[in-house]
C-alpha cells in the first residue's frame, strides 16, 4: 500500500503513515493478532507464585515465554515509565509510555510517548514499520 499524501510504502495494515502522519482508509483491517490483556493477572499471580514483579527482567521474560514471543515481536504499553517502559526496554522490548498526566515526552528508538490514547495506533504503526524494515 502506498500513502496517497507522500508516496511512502506502507504495510497492508497501516492506519497511519509513519512518514507524514496521514490517516489511511478507515476500512483498512488490523492484522490478525491475538492481543493479550492479562497484565493485571500477571501482576497479581506472578508475585503470589514467588516470581518477580515489574520492572524485573524475570517478569518480562516470563510473559514473553508464556506468549511464545521474541522481544522484537512485543510492544509494551504502560503508564509507569520506570516499571513499564524501562523494564521492557531492559529486556529488548519496545514500549509506549502513556503519559496522560504531564506534557513530558521521552523518545528513543526503543520507546515513544503518547498523551492521548487516540495517538496509540499511530505509535504502534511506527514500531511495526520500523521492525519490518530490519
Image (cartoon, rainbow, N blue to C red):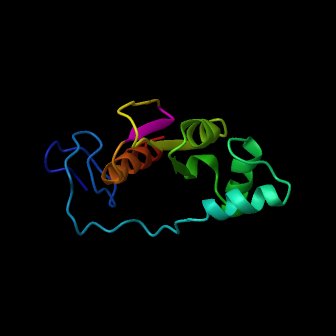
Image position, residue 27 (x, y; %):
23, 69
- Whether residue 92 appears in this view of the structure is no
Image position, residue 72 (x, y; %):
57, 46
Direction from residue 9 to residue 102 in the image, left or right:
right
Direction from residue 17 to residue 44 in the image, left or right:
right
- Give the residues in magenta: 109-114
Q: Residue at x 77, y 46 (%)?
A: 58
Query: Where 16 sits versus 80, above or below?
Result: below
Image position, residue 49 (x, y; %):
84, 60
Q: Is residue 126 magenta?
A: no
Q: Residue at x 14, y 50 (%)?
A: 4
**The N terminus is located in which quarter?**
bottom left
Q: Residue at x 41, y 66 (%)?
A: 31
Query: Where 94 sits versus 125, above or below?
Result: above
Direction from residue 27 to residue 131 in the image, left or right:
right
Q: Is residue 112 magenta?
A: yes
Tell me where residue 80 sits by quadrant.
top right
- Whether residue 132 appears in this view of the structure is yes
Tell me where residue 57 sits by quadrant.
top right
Image position, residue 127 (x, y; %):
43, 45
- Examine the residues drawn in magenta and state their main secondary structure: strand
Query: Where 32 sits versus 79, above or below?
Result: below
> Which residue reaches farthest left?
5
Count of marks placed on residues: 0
> Which residue reaches farthest right?
50
Direction from residue 34 to residue 54 in the image, left or right:
right
Amino acid at each position: 500500500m502506498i500513502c496517497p499524501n507522500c508516496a511512502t510504502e506502507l504495510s497492508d495494515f497501516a492506519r497511519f503513515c509513519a512518514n507524514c502522519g496521514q490517516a489511511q482508509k478507515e476500512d483498512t483491517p488490523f492484522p490478525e493478532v491475538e492481543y493479550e490483556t492479562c497484565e493485571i493477572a500477571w501482576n497479581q499471580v506472578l508475585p503470589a507464585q514467588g516470581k518477580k514483579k515489574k520492572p524485573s527482567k524475570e517478569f518480562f521474560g516470563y510473559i514473553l515465554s508464556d506468549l511464545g514471543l521474541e522481544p522484537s515481536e512485543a510492544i509494551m504499553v504502560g503508564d509507569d515509565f520506570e516499571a513499564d517502559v524501562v523494564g521492557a526496554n531492559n529486556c529488548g522490548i519496545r514500549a509506549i509510555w502513556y503519559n496522560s498526566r504531564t506534557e513530558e515526552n521521552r523518545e528513543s528508538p526503543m520507546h515513544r510517548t503518547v498523551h492521548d490514547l487516540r495517538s496509540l495506533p499511530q505509535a504502534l504503526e511506527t514500531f511495526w514499520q520500523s521492525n519490518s524494515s530490519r
